[in-house]
């Protein structure tokens, strides 16, 4: 096993999953707080079962696709996904769009669940369970994509799954201990880093899929990540600089 | 149906947030594929050209978004 590739796959999968699991946890916590832990945990378990089934079903299918074609498809999807995250993280860090607020998400979800319970008391537990299930599946679909995409290009799906699993366990443990939304997690910084890593993987695999090769082989992923990091940092500074210039002119 | 709609929206939204950036990425990857196939540029230059184009597209996109806010 190539350890540079394996470690980059595990860290990308861990960090990306961590962000998504924190978001799903907020909603599961809201369900548990409002309607009790039985529907919250049942919904979570059902959602996780669907996600595991997806990995088990789609993972082996990847081995049937010729490697070059797989690398192009995965590379392009990773580029779209990673650059979308990076773009959003740059705009959030520069204050162009608001940061994701777990406390706000928690209070919104709690309010919605309380309204649902009043309006449809006979089905309140079912609706709560469905809310937890939906949150786990919708956030988890991104985790499944990341696991399959970063792991699939090199036959490292097990390593990528391990990264995602560790993220689930850590968020679960911290969540069980603190019992409140994990709003202090530097979500935007994590998204910035993950966006950089996924964009680097995508760029690397697209070229390999097209029949090109990178100087330094797998080490090029790290160089590409540094390159995207510089672009992200530069974009942030340029936006902040322009905004302060505009403010100065306006005043 | 609501759940399925949300799932489809989530799947679509995973890859496309700003349509112009997504299209630009696809066009750039296509251009690199054409460049490789034509043999107009040395093979070892394709990687750096691919990266520089993507970095430029991202930079232009976020600066435009910041300008139009």
Image: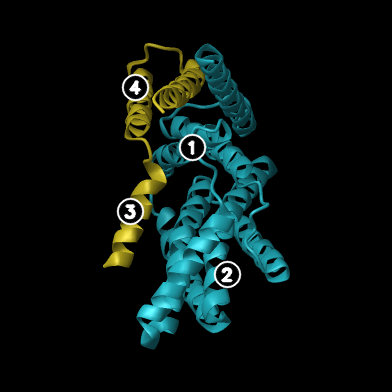
Chain colours: A cyan, B yellow
Looking at the rendered structure, whether the residues under marks 2 and 1 are on a common chain is answered as: yes
Same chain, marks 3 and 4?
Answer: yes
How crowded pointer 2 is (Cα within 10 Å; few <14, some 14-19, many 20+) is rated as many
Q: In the drawing, what numbered circle is on residue B31?
A: 4
> Total label count?
4
User: Which circle's residue, 2 or 1, is located before the other in the chain?
Assistant: 2
Residue A50 appears in the rendering: no
Q: Is residue B22 above or below residue A139?
A: above
Q: Which residue is mark 1?
A: A97
For the residues labelled 2 and 4, the Cα–Cα distance comes to 47 Å
User: Percent x, y for residue A135?
Assistant: 46, 65
Bin the neighbour count of mark 1 within 10 Å (Cα to Cα): few under 14, some 14-19, many 20 and up. Answer: some
Question: Which mark is nearer the camera, 2 or 4?
Answer: 2
Q: CA distance from mark 3 to mark 1?
A: 21 Å
Q: Secondary structure at mark 1?
A: loop
Spatial separation of the CA atoms under disc 3 and disc 4: 29 Å
Q: Which residue is mark 2?
A: A29
Where does the C terminus of chain A fall, quadrant-wise?
A: top right
Question: Which residue lies under the disc numbered 3?
Answer: B9
Q: Earlier in the sequence, mark 3 or mark 4?
A: 3
Q: Does A90 appear above or below A238?
A: below
Question: Which residue occupies the foreground of this view, A48 or A192?
Answer: A192
């Amino acid at each position: 096993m190539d350890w540079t590739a394996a470690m980059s796959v595990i860290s990308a999968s861990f960090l990306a999953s961590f962000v998504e699991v924190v978001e799903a946890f907020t909603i599961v916590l809201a369900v548990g707080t409002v309607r009790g832990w039985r529907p919250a945990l049942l919904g979570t378990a059902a959602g996780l079962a669907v996600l595991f089934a997806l990995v088990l079903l789609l993972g082996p299918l990847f081995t049937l696709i010729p490697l070059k074609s797989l690398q192009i498809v995965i590379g392009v999807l990773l580029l779209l996904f990673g650059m979308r995250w990076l773009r959003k993280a740059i705009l959030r860090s520069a204050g162009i769009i608001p940061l994701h607020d777990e406390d706000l998400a928690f209070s919104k979800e709690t309010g919605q669940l309380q309204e649902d319970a009043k309006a449809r008391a006979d089905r309140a537990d079912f609706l709560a369970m469905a809310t937890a299930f939906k949150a786990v599946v919708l956030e988890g679909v991104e985790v499944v994509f990341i696991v399959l995409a970063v792991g699939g290009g090199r036959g490292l799906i097990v390593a990528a799954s391990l990264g995602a699993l560790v993220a689930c366990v850590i968020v679960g443990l911290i969540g069980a201990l603190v019992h409140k939304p994990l709003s202090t997690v530097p979500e935007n910084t994590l998204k910035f880093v993950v966006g950089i890593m996924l964009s680097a993987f995508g760029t690397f695999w697209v070229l390999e899929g097209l029949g090109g090769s990178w100087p330094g082989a797998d080490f090029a992923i790290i160089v590409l990540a540094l390159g995207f990091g510089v672009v992200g940092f530069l974009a942030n500074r340029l936006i902040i600089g322009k905004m302060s210039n505009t403010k100065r002119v306006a005043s | 149906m609501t759940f399925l709609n949300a799932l489809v929206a989530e799947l679509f939204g995973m890859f496309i947030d700003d349509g112009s950036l997504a299209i630009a990425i696809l066009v750039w990857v296509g251009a690199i594929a054409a460049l490789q196939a034509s043999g107009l540029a040395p093979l070892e230059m394709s990687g750096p050209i691919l990266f520089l184009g993507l970095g430029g597209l991202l930079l232009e996109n976020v600066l435009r978004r910041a300008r139009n806010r």
